[in-house]
Amino acid sequence: MLKLKSLVLLFILFATFSISTAQHKLVKTKVSKDISIFLPTDWKAMDQQDFTERYPSVRAPIAAYTNIHRSVDFAVNISATQWPDENLELAQRFFKSSIMNMFDRVEFESEGVKEVKGKKYVYFTFTSRVQGNRSNESLRDPVVRYNHLQYLVTKNRTLVFSFSSPARERDDWDETANNIMNSIQVK
């Protein structure tokens, strides 16, 4: 009887691990004619309604994707800010300041400059918090998210790659987020 219980427990653990890793299997995705990336196989491109709800901006993203629960997102955008001299140190300070102004609270975990596929990116990983709205019952709770941002600064444009998940799901998505960000290829 004890062996049977042990086997059942082992099977449940194996099944849980298999489901968890299967959800994060990545496949090469062409974002635009000159950008490709590896994303989870079960993610889908956001439609216009998702764009409007999640990216309330004059400038729509080049592309944006979400998981089946619409809780974890990845987007590629062109920043309105251009850097004529590709000064990554100055750009990093500017981007950090912008991030701090976008949210009520930011806890940075890492930041710097790294090379991915032969190109240098300014990157940040952080947890963000936006306070809730006390006058709106459905929006009272604060929104806390785990974020990875990478900026590719060139003379003509600044590309922004962003990954975001609920902070409570960070452990489930951290490795996948790193794999996604390290798979970015820009021609």
Image: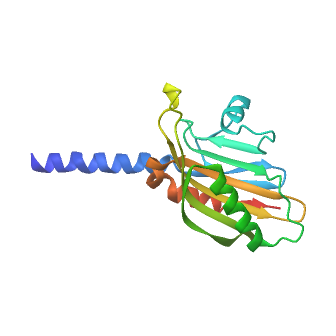
- Write down the quadrant of residue 160 in the picture: bottom right
Q: Residue at x 70, y 39 (%)?
A: 55
Q: Is residue 118 left or right of residue 136?
A: right
Residue drawn at x 23%, y 48% is 9
Q: Nearer the viewer, residue 96 or 5?
A: 96
For residue 11, side relative to residue 88 (left or right):
left
Task: Give coordinates of residue 166: x percent, y percent.
Answer: 50, 45
As drawn, 60 above or below 186: above
Measuring from the top left, give residue 182's x and y in whole percent: 64, 63
Q: Quadrant of the N terminus?
A: top left
In the image, residue 14 above or below residue 137: below
Quadrant of image for the C terminus: bottom right
Residue at position x 57%, y 49% in the image: 104
Q: Position of residue 122 (x, y in %)?
A: 70, 67
User: Which scheme is used to colour this image of the protein?
Assistant: rainbow
Looking at this view, is 106 or 115 the one in front?
106
Quadrant of residue 176 in the image? bottom right
The correct choice, above or below, for 26 with respect to 109 in the image is above
Which is more toward the observer, 179 or 126? 126
Looking at the picture, how far across and down is residue 186, in whole percent? 79, 60
Task: Identify the residue at horizontal 89%, vertical 65% (top origin).
Answer: 155
